[in-house]
Amino acid sequence: MKFSKMKLGTKLISAFVLVCVIGAVVSGIGIRNMARINDEGDKVYHLDLIGLSMTQRADVDLLKAGRALRNAILASSTEQRAGFLMDSEKNLAQAREALDKAQPLYWSEKGKAVFADLDHSWRDYTEAFKDMETKTGSASFQDRGELTEKLFGDFRQKVNKVDDLITTLVDVKQENAKEAAESNQNLYMESRNLMIALVIFSTLAGIGIGMWLTRSLTRQLGTEPAIAADLAKSVAEGDLSVNIDLRPGDTTSLMASRVSTLLIADV
């Protein structure tokens, strides 16, 4: 069925439905893009920020463990040494726990590779750490030269390697967070530009539909609705002298057909 042959109610409903569909499409695209931005924000928080926090906590605990071990070497009594060794053991366990929580949050290939190197270096470090604890616990308080030499020798190299890898992990998370922020910014700009374009398009489409519908109705009536109403009122009152202006060549509109009827009736 042609649009020009439709009833007035059908035309109005069709135009209204079309405008609603355009609005729904614009809204749907906006909601989808907002959901994508929200998902990226959640990813930054749950993976990058929490992963960064756990890694930094592990680094702090690692430093505490090393400080406690040095204090144990320098202790002047058995009670002090035992307390510092207990602290070093606790801090080392806390560092490992923080790393275990952080590891699943490293999703990039670079992060996974660095963590694999860290796990290997961690085993060497913990073995050296345990060895230092054992020797510290049995060393005399007067002779600390051997322990000090070992502390600043091979043991220090293992500590530095682990610390460097943890620092690299922190850098990876910071890079990931920066990339995610830039991605969100780009997504926002794309969404904003798309929404502006869609709003302009929907506005123009609404204006176009209104003009098209108005012209279609006018052509179907043959004149403005108010003029048609006045004509109907005059005819109902028996006044057939009303002047009616039709478009040149108009023979199909409602007004044209009524004019023909009136002319026949007048004859």
Image: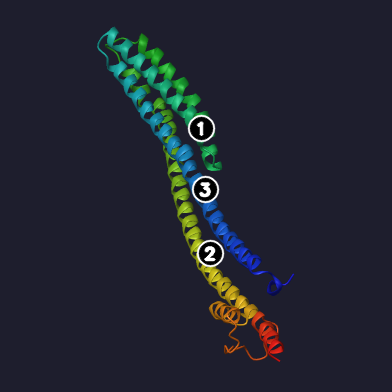
**Where residue 151 sits in the image (x, y, percent)?**
36, 23
Which of the two labelled residues, at mark 1 and mark 3, occupies the earlier sequence position? Answer: 3
Q: Which residue is mark 1?
A: 103
- Please tell me whether mark 1 sits on a helix, a strand or a loop: helix
Amino acid type, callout 2: Leu
Residue depicted at x 58% and y 85%: 239
Mark toward the viewer: 1 or 2: 2
Q: Residue furthest right?
A: 1
Residue depicted at x 64% and y 82%: 255
Q: Are marks 1 and 3 in contact (CB under 8 Å)?
A: no
**Where residue 200 sits in the image (x, y, percent)?**
50, 68
Residue nearest the viewer, comparing 127 with 35:
35
Residue depicted at x 58% and y 58%: 25
In the rendered structure, find residue 198 and report the number of the disc placed on it.
2
Q: Which residue is mark 3?
A: 35
- Please tell me whether mark 2 sits on a helix, a strand or a loop: helix
- Please tell me whether mark 3 sits on a helix, a strand or a loop: helix
Q: Are marks 2 and 3 in contact (CB under 8 Å)?
A: no
What separation in Å lies between label 1 and label 3 (alpha carbons)? 27 Å
Q: Quadrant of the N terminus?
A: bottom right
Mark toward the viewer: 2 or 3: 2
Residue nearest the viewer, comparing 71 with 88:
88
Mark 2 neighbour density, 10 Å: few (under 14) some (14–19) many (20 or more): some
**Where residue 205 sits in the image (x, y, percent)?**
56, 70
Q: Quadrant of the C terminus?
A: bottom right
Answer with the quarter of the image where residue 62 lies: top left
Residue 56 vertical placement versus 201 (above, below): above
Residue nearest the viewer, comparing 112 with 143:
112
